Every structure is written in C-alpha cells, then in structure tokens.
Image (cartoon, coloured by chain):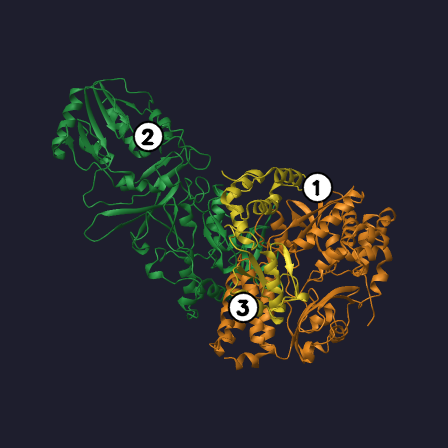
Chain colours: A orange, B yellow, C green
Amino acid sequence: MKTCKIVSRKFHLENSHTLEVAKVHGAYNTLEKMEVYSSLEIIEIIKESNLRGKGGGGSPAGDKWVLMPQNSDNPSFLVVNCDESEPGTFKDRQIISKDPHLLIEGILITCFAIKAKHAYIYIRGEYKQFQDILQSAIDEAYKDGLLDNCDITIHRGAGAYICGEKSALLESMEGKRGHPRLKPKQKEPEWFFDHPALVNNVETIASVPFIIQNGANAYKAFGTKQSPGTLLFAMSGHVNKPGVYEAEYGTPMMEYIEYFGGGIKNAKKLKAVIPGGASSAILTAEEASTVTLDYETMRSMGSSLGTGGMIVMDEDTCMVSALKNLLEFYHEESCGQCTPCREGTGWTDKLVGKIVNKEGTKEDIDKLLDIADTMNGKTICVFAPAVATVITSFLSKFRDEFEAAL
Amino acid sequence: MSFIFNDENLLKIEALKKRYPSPKALCLPCLWMAQHQEGFISIDAIDVISEKIGIPPMEIYRVVTFYTMFHLEPQDKINVQVCKTLSCKLCGSDEILKHLEDKDVNIQHVECLGSCGTAPVMQIDDIYYEDLTPAKVDTILKELR
Amino acid sequence: MSKMIDIIVDSKTYTAKEGSLLIDLLIKEKIKVPYFCYHESLGADGNCRMCMVEIEGQKRPQIACDTLIKEHMEVRSTGKNIEKIRTDILELELINHPVDCPVCDQAGECSLQEFYMDYGLHNAKVIIQDKVKHTKHVDLGSNVILDQERCVLCARCTRFTDKITGTHELGIIGRGDHARVTTMPGRKLDNPYAMNVVDLCPVGALTSKDFRFSQRVWFLQTVNSICHGCAKGCNIFIDHNKMKYQDDVIYRFRPRRNDDVNGFFMCDEGRLSYKQLQENRQETTLLNGKEITEDEAIQEAKELIQRYKDTISVVIDANLYSEEMEAILTFAKEINASVYSPLDVYVDESFKDDMLKSANRAANYKTIGILNIDTNKPKSNGLIINFNHPQEFKADSHINFFTHKCDRDDLVFPIAVFSENSGTLKNEDGIVQKCEKAVSRNIPIPTIIESLIKISL
C-alpha cells in the first residue's frame, strides 16, 4: 500500500496541534504563495487539481469557488463545514484536534482566493472538546499575526444532523432552525444574510495548502484520473483496528480494510460494508471485494463514496436490525420540513420495527420499497433520497433475511 | 424578567456582534451562554436573547426545540448521552445502555456522536468517553459523583 | 420588464408572464393541482410537495409552486406518473392524520378530503394506535382552536403571523414527525387578524371557536357582501342557512379575495360583526315605548310631518346603501326637509391600524360627501327624522327608523339591516362595491325604501 500523507502528515507528532510544532513542520509556508499568485490563479490551480469536496458530495471544489464574486462591495464569507454527523464519519475531528493549523492555513488561502475577509467554522455542538483545541489554535494564530487580514470565528451547532447540509447550515448560522433551503434557479453562491458564501468541508480546505504548495500535478499524482488525491477514509464496526487512515482514491476497499484495519474482528467473515457514511448504499462482501475507493467506481456499483467512512459488518450481523438502527437515526434526524421525509422516515422506521418484532408481512416489504420510491427525488434536500437508497439497498441485497424474519 | 446575562457573557455578546454581519447570527451562541449560565434555557432567557438579537421569541423557541443539545427544563441528574447509531451498536452500545439502566442518571439515547472508531461512546456534559465497557462506565460515573 | 410568453400545459397553450410562478397560472386557469402549503398571500414554501408536475427536459418531477415560467416550457399536470406521485405523497400526509372527518368541523371544505377523493382512496395501512400522538383541543386564543393531529404542517398559519401580522405568535416546534404548531408556553395567539388562520388552514387543524359545530358547511348558502365595520369595505362571504321551521340565520362572515381592497383577509372584529345583525333587533313599530300597528305608526308619522312642515330635519346613517341615501334625499326634498349626516361620531382613531382597519367606522361615508349631504348637526328643532344615525339630536318630536332596539320615547319604525337587503357602498378609497341580499326573514322587516313609500305623503 502506497503511503500518502497530505492531510494527516503531522497527525502522529506530539503536540501537533500547537503552533510551535506545526511551524517546525512547515505550517503556513504556503502563505508566501499569496505574494506569487493572484486570487484567480489560486482558483485556477484548485480547478486544475480537480480537488473533490470531501464532505460527502464529491463535487469539484473549484466549481463552487468560481461562483464567488471577485469584485464586489458586498463582503463575501467562507464557511467551513465541521458539522460532521454522518454515521461512520469521524475524520474532520482528527484534523481540528491533530492539525488545526493546517485548516487555518487552508482557510487563509481560500479566503484570499475568494476575496473573503472572514471565515466561520460551523462545528457540531457535541465536538466541544475538539472545538476547544481548534479555538486555542486560532487564538495562537491571532497572537502570531497570522489572522491580521482575515478573521476566523467558530460557530457552534447544537445537535442536528441536517445542519451538515450546506443551506441548512447557513440557516442555522443565521439563527434559525436548520431547514434546507429551496434550490436556487441558477448557479450561484450560497448566501449568508445576503452575502455570498462558500461552504466547504474541513478536509477540503485542509487539502488546499498541499495543492497550492506543490501544484495541481503533485496532487493528481495520487488517486485516479477522475478522483485525484487522497481522502481521510475511516473504518468502524467489526474491524480489528478501527480509525481514520489517509489513503489515495482508487485504493481497493478490501486492501484498505486489511492493511489499516487489520481485517475483520474475531477472524469472522465479512458480510457487508456501508462504504461512505450511513447514507450510501450498502455493499455485500462480494461487492466489497471488487470495489476501489473512488467516486466513479462507487457510483457504478449503485452506491457512493460519500464521506469515505466505512461501516464494516461481520457475518453475524442481523441486517434487519442494522436497517432498523439506521432508520431510527433518520427518523430522529429528519428536520420535518417537507412531507415525504417527515412522514416517510417515521413510517419506514415503524414498518421495519414490525419486521424486527416478527410481526411483519410481505406487504410491509413491498410498502417499504414503495415509500422509498416516494421519498426519492421529491423532497427539498437529499436527506430523504439517501434514506430511500439505504432502504432499497438493504432490501434488494438482503431480501432473504428480511423475508426470513416475517 | 428574571433572567439576566452575567457580565462575562454580556462582554462576549458585544464582542461577537462585531464578528457577524447581523446580530441574528448570535442566536445559537446566546442560547449556549444562557444554558451554561443557568443549566437550561428558560422562557425568560429567550425573551432576553430576543431583545438582544432581534429575533422574535417564538422563533428562538422554535430553534431551541430543533436542536437536541438544548434543554428547556433544569437537569436534575447527570445527563448521559449514549450513542446508539450503527457503529456503536455493532460494538456493544446495547450493553452499555442496559448497564446504565439501574444507575441514578438520566439516559439520553443520542444519534451518531462522530466517534465511530472508538465505539461504543457516551458523552457527559462536553466530554466524550470512548471505547466503553461496563466496568469503564462504573469508574467514570464514580469519578463524576 | 418581464414579457408575456406562451407555455404549454397538458398540450394546451397558455400565455403567462415570464418568471412568474407556474402554480399561479395553474390556479388561474383552473388546472387541477393539489397543494397545502402554497397560498397566494404567503408565497411558496415548498414543504408539502403535493403540487408536483412534470416538466419536459427535467429528470425529476418539480413542484409547481417553486417553478418559474420560462419560454418554451412544456408542463404535464396529469398522467399516470404524476398521479401516482400525488397519491403517494398524499398517503404520507394521511398516515398520521386521525381521519376523523365525521366529527371534524372542516369536513366539506377540507383540502385533505378533496385531494383524497381526487388522488387518494388508499386502504388504511397504519392503525390508529400506531399514529403519532399530539395534543387536541388546544385553545390558542382569539377564538382559534388547534388540533395538532389533524395538522399537515403546511406552515400557512405560522407564515401568516410571521409575514402578514408580524406578531410571531405561532410556530412549528420539534422536528421530524414530532413537529407541531403551537404558541410559546403560557402565551396566546393575540392579534386583531388572528382568525384568518382558520381560513388559511387547509385542513381541520385550526377551527373557529365561534363557528365550529354550529353548522355543517354543506348546508350553508353563500352570498357576496361587504363588511360594514369600517370604511375599508373588506369583501366578504356571508354564510347563512334557513333551517326547517326556523329563521334564516347568518353563521359566519369570511373574507372574500379582492386585491384592490382587502387582499385575502379581514379583521376579527369585522368577522364577528355578523352577530350584531341578529341581536337586539328592532322588529316592531313603537310609539313612546308601546307597540302599535304599522298602520297606526304610518298615520302618526304622516301627521307629524304635516305638523312640523318646514322645520323638519332628516338625519342619515353613513352606513346606509347609496340607493337608500338617494331615496331619502328625494323624500326629504318632497317634504322640504334639510338633510344631515354628522360624521364625527364614526371616527375612532383607536380602531385604526396600517393593515385593513380604518378610523372611519362608517361603510359609506364617502357617498355622504358625494351627495353633498351636510355633515353638521341638524339645525331645525321641530321634527327630526332619523334614519339609523347613532346620535340623538334635540327636537320637539322624532321619527326614528332603527335596525336595532334603542330606548327612545318616540315613534320608531323597524328597518332591515344590510344583510337583509342589497345595495352599493363606496369605500374610503372611492371603490364602489355591491352587497347582495343574504337573509330572508320569516317575518320580513321593511327596507328603508319600502318604508319611505309607505310614509310618503
């Protein structure tokens, strides 16, 4: 396995979160580039690198950056999404607790590129411990004069999965409930109180310094042609060494699980993997053995790479209980704004609950698929379609297990 | 109104106002301060925040009920938030939940805490307790009392 | 700026403003589209997802309330696909609904019922015990009762108190299927337009404490009229019913849309003013407090008019129909009387607001000016003939034409109220509006014009 440490380079160092240690290991060296490059040139390099958004969507970051106005009297903002709440995902917390200065460096370059003078980091409320580490890093950066021309403010969430959706996140920052907004009619930036805003995931921004320092080609030397670079993939569930390990896109999934995760716990057989956070379609062991960890391969398998947080399940896992568990999550977390999601998450949870309690019927399975269809593509945001994907993938790949439970 | 922000928080609020394009953005920060100050968010506190940031009380009340970490009532026991989502479940959160049942604590089932690699996990106040076993839970609760 | 363009809906071409909302066109052209959350006064919210249509070139169905009309747009509002989507979303809307139509006051004017007949007809798949439980019979204040279980969370009521009145009493709290409409703990819905949320609510979640359980709506007859509460002239529907062996009764006023006058709404005071039309009415002719026959009263009136010749003043209420005012002027001329309508008494600055309520609490005071009627107090102190003006003026003798009982020791003729008669009014902005006759009493009370004919010399 090729080691590649773009974002996790300093993770292993003692006191890596301090400015002193970070600086010894090259932090903030990229800032010189802001004297060399214009803002548009930086955006060009990011576009050239084909840096993909690492929060789950995987769309090219540069596509969003170019939407930000370069010459406007209306101040722009960068909003860094650290609402990491997708089950199976715990990578951004590694960055903010182990190398917060890398994120700050990335923020400074990004703000320079999009002409923003203030960046907010929206962090999930539960991450208070890690927020405190990040805050002390920001305080150090202020003291050191690094933030003379660009402010950074941490904005703490308070417990709502949906706030990871960028428009819900902005609503939340505006002091409202985290309800996703209706999609704009044309390509435009996001809006924070009538100000253009760029919303990017922590890891996306933390990848920026490497690209600007070493050039787009150095980044593209990792990964595949369409999914260049690396991702902080994560593993949890039935593996021997769960955790976050950076790897390049295109790494075979099983090789990753074996190499970093030390294989399946208790020498059991693999049954299934949810590849990219709970909201990606589940893969059977057989499928897992063929896939590589990149956006295109995952899509071709009818799933998605998502956040790269793999949930690994061994042969003894009950798929009906696993689905029930995930549906409880969605039922609890649906914002309740639009009908198919609000009612669909509750109803599917109850139906699978019936099956878990051995009270299910064949009609319930058909109804589940029917509701999933209604939840897919008819809502304001992608929450309900994700639930639909989860339901249909479990039912199509493990149908016999559901039928056996009737 | 019986709620007033303490001086420290008042200073924080004024400082934060300079960091946002609208005082409305101070909704969550003010709610956090109120909850830290009193242990919960009272209707009086909502009215005070409303005056400070210009969001109607009802809208702030709606916000409080949207986020799982805010409490409208005082918490009389230790609030143990146990993650019950899939990775923790696969790694034994059921056992932890069962073990907590006869303890004198308030058990709150919460969704993914983002600590899947160190499952099972629980959170008390702002602190994560990871790689839990029933024995470890006992030690943690003993230390907290 | 925006131009008119042609778009195709269900293979038919329509002309619409570019960039306007597709749903507005569908509503205007009466193309069937189900929706809960959209309302023309509140704009799009996009939460109910019922108004799905197919748009050529778009992979997924789109909600019409969030679709802007574009050149060459081709829309399909019918077809198997779109009907299945509507059926399925409606089923989700209904799974936690109590389906208590037989005891629900909204039955007969409920969007949920209507769409169920159009798209639903599902078998019940969730038994009542498994439905999400919420609170019923919540008295929100201002005559509004909430049943949270019937609510479809369309947020029309909360958007009304946010955007229209700016009073922010109502809000949706909680999330997921536990979300519900409420007021803040210990606080009430309290604004002068609160009852409009009952009209806005597409289902039986918000009902009027004043109207609920008094009539099933399908028994009601509806006529168009104008509220007489002030000079704004809010357009209303009068809903009334004459039950067997009983008198014709008005059960409610509802605002009727008129974008030039009141938009979609009316104030609660105006809405409840229907009650005054049926309470404490003057129904018989009186002389010094004693009942006399109409013939005796007419005789008495004629004698008084003869006796006080040339010292007669006529006083008229500024709420009367224009036709009535003109008839009174003609009558006054015949008997050589001068005509007055003092308007000060109608001015109530405390009633006024910047929405619909006017300080001039006389529905037709504009016409008083147009007819050049003297707005000073009557000068003559011989005989005063008062056509329902609220003030009493000193004179040797009085003939009164009153809609409501009034303890004055004089000759009193009963007259019909506006809902028992038809006519026109001019509102404070100069807009002429027509009221239809709503109520026909078992024992009719004469209109002013009928009475004038009888007492004319």
- Image quadrant assignment for residue C134: bottom left
Mark 3 or 2: in front is 3
Mark 3 or 1: in front is 3
Residue carrying label 3: B98
Please state if A74 lies on the left or on the right of C199 as rendered: right
At horizontal 67% and vertical 81% (from top left) the residue drawn is A269
Q: Residues within 10 Å of mark 3 (few under 14, many from 20)?
A: few
Label 1, secondary structure: give it. Answer: loop
Label ID, residue C318: 2
Q: Amino acid at mark 2?
A: Ala
Label ID, residue B142: none
At horizontal 75% and vertical 52% (from top left) the residue drawn is A66
Residue carrying label 1: A74
Q: Amino acid at mark 1?
A: Asn
- Image quadrant assignment for residue A185: bottom right
Mark 1 or 2: in front is 1
The answer to whether C166 is drawn above or below residue A336 in the figure is above
